[in-house]
């Protein structure tokens, strides 16, 4: 095991990035220490690598997420297999997949890594200081409405905390949280389109956002609340098939007894609003969507009413650290100002 670690370190010293060199140096020191004691134990870094391979499906993708080279990832997985004495991966020329033992170890890894997060949060709570560098991701409508004002407030209140904000799609953001590249990710879940529970993620609810109907300005239904059944004969402007909003549209349409006649597709609600303004059809959008300046009408959607539930996602067990706790509390407070009696109350 030690010889393999030395060879991998030499490879990374010549070809790897600064981050990957530091990473493997630490692994090497750990291996030397436990090898000297004659002790072999699970290495949490290797468990994290295995989980990333399971999450992303390829060694190359896992390596990119962890800022390592593919040879370094392959090496650590082989060391893990050697330590356990069982194959964890089935490799072919074109693909890689977990064995039954590998899948079971990933489930254990989720618990082990979460307990590590709990331990770090528990110990750092003694200091009680909000310091360091926190990486937060948000999606566009959350950024425009409450996330960026919340970050500004955090920076004023905690001057020793550096906050970096990235605009990421919620699906990618959750993956980046698990990989350790993001600390807090803003995400959402639509009614009728639940997200699968992720054992490596803790959720903190922030805001329930109504979904509204978007109509051309002179549409026959522009005068008041709209039922889904009223839109049976309409052309629709919708998001693309893989999105939660598209799946929600298909669900409520099926429930009302029709299949939407789709005239326009875009993953940008502003583009959908522009298509509706041009007369291509009707659509739905979250109430916080910035549609200002468009000649359209927005009305409540009823029968059924739909909401988008916005939440913060963190690595399981990490929510107790003073820094993450402070950020979550501020996000919740600012989002709370947009509640039923605030700006999110529908006003036609």
Image (tube, rainbow, N blue to C red):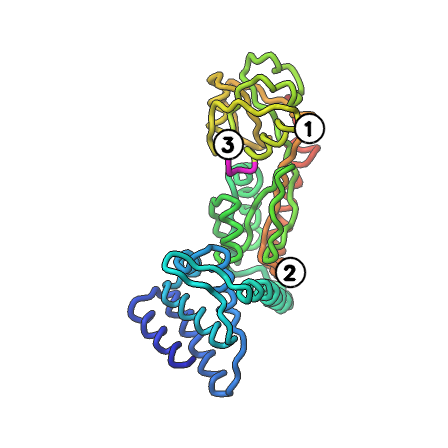
Q: Position of residue 250 (x, y in %)?
A: 58, 30
Q: CA distance from mark 1 to mark 3?
A: 19 Å
In this rendering, is residue 50 above or below 257?
Answer: below
| Mark positioned earlier in the residue sequence (1 or 3) | 3
* Residue 320 tag number: 2
- Taking the spot 60% from the left edge, 12% from the top edge, the residue there is 220
Whether residue 343 appears in this view of the structure is no
Which span of residues is magenta-colored?
Answer: 239-244
Residue occupying the far left of the picture: 14
* Residue 304 tag number: 1
Residue 63 shown left or right of residue 300 in the figure: left
Residue occupying the far bottom of the picture: 37
Helix or strand or loop: what does disc 1 sit on? Answer: loop
> In which quarter of the view is residue 70 placed?
bottom left
Verify whether residue 241 appears in magenta: yes
Q: Residues within 10 Å of mark 1 (few under 14, many from 20)?
A: few
Residue 167 shown left or right of residue 203 in the figure: left
| Mark positioned earlier in the residue sequence (2 or 1) | 1
Q: Which residue is mark 3?
A: 239
Q: CA distance from mark 3 to mark 2?
A: 37 Å
Q: Residues within 10 Å of mark 3 (few under 14, many from 20)?
A: many
Question: Quick one: 95 or 270, which is closer to the camera?
Answer: 95
Q: Position of residue 346 (x, y in %)?
A: 66, 27
């Amino acid at each position: 095991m030690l010889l393999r670690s030395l060879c991998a370190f030499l490879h990374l010293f010549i070809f790897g990035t600064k981050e990957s060199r530091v990473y493997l140096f630490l692994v090497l020191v750990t291996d030397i220490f436990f090898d000297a004691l004659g002790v072999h134990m699970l290495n949490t870094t290797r468990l994290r690598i295995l989980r990333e391979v399971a999450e992303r499906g390829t060694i190359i993708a896992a390596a990119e997420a962890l800022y390592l080279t593919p040879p370094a990832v392959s090496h650590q997985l082989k060391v893990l297999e050697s330590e356990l004495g069982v194959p964890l991966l089935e490799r072919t020329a074109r693909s890689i997949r977990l064995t039954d033992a590998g899948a079971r170890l990933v489930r254990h890894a989720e618990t082990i890594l979460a307990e590590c997060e709990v331990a770090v949060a528990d110990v750092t709570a003694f200091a009680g200081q909000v310091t360091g560098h926190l990486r937060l991701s948000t999606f566009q409508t959350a950024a425009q409405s409450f996330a960026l004002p919340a970050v500004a407030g955090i920076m004023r209140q905690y001057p020793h905390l550096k906050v970096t904000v990235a605009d990421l799609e919620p699906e990618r953001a959750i993956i980046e949280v698990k990989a350790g590249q993001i600390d807090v990710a803003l995400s959402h879940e639509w009614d009728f389109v639940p997200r699968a529970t992720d054992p490596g993620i803790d959720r903190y609810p922030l805001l329930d956002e109504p979904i509204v109907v978007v109509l051309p300005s002179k549409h026959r239904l522009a005068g008041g609340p709209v039922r889904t059944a009223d839109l049976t004969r309409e052309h629709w402007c919708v998001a693309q098939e893989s999105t939660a909003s598209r799946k929600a549209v298909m669900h409520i349409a099926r429930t009302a007894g029709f299949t939407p006649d789709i005239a326009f597709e875009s993953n940008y609600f502003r583009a959908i609003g522009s298509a509706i303004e041009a007369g291509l059809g009707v659509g739905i959008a979250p109430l916080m969507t910035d549609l200002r300046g468009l000649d359209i009408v927005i009305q409540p959607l009823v029968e059924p009413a739909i909401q988008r539930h916005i939440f913060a996602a963190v690595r399981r067990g990490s929510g107790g650290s003073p820094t993450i706790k402070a950020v979550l509390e501020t996000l919740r407070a600012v989002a709370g100002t947009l509640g039923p009696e605030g700006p999110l109350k529908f006003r036609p």
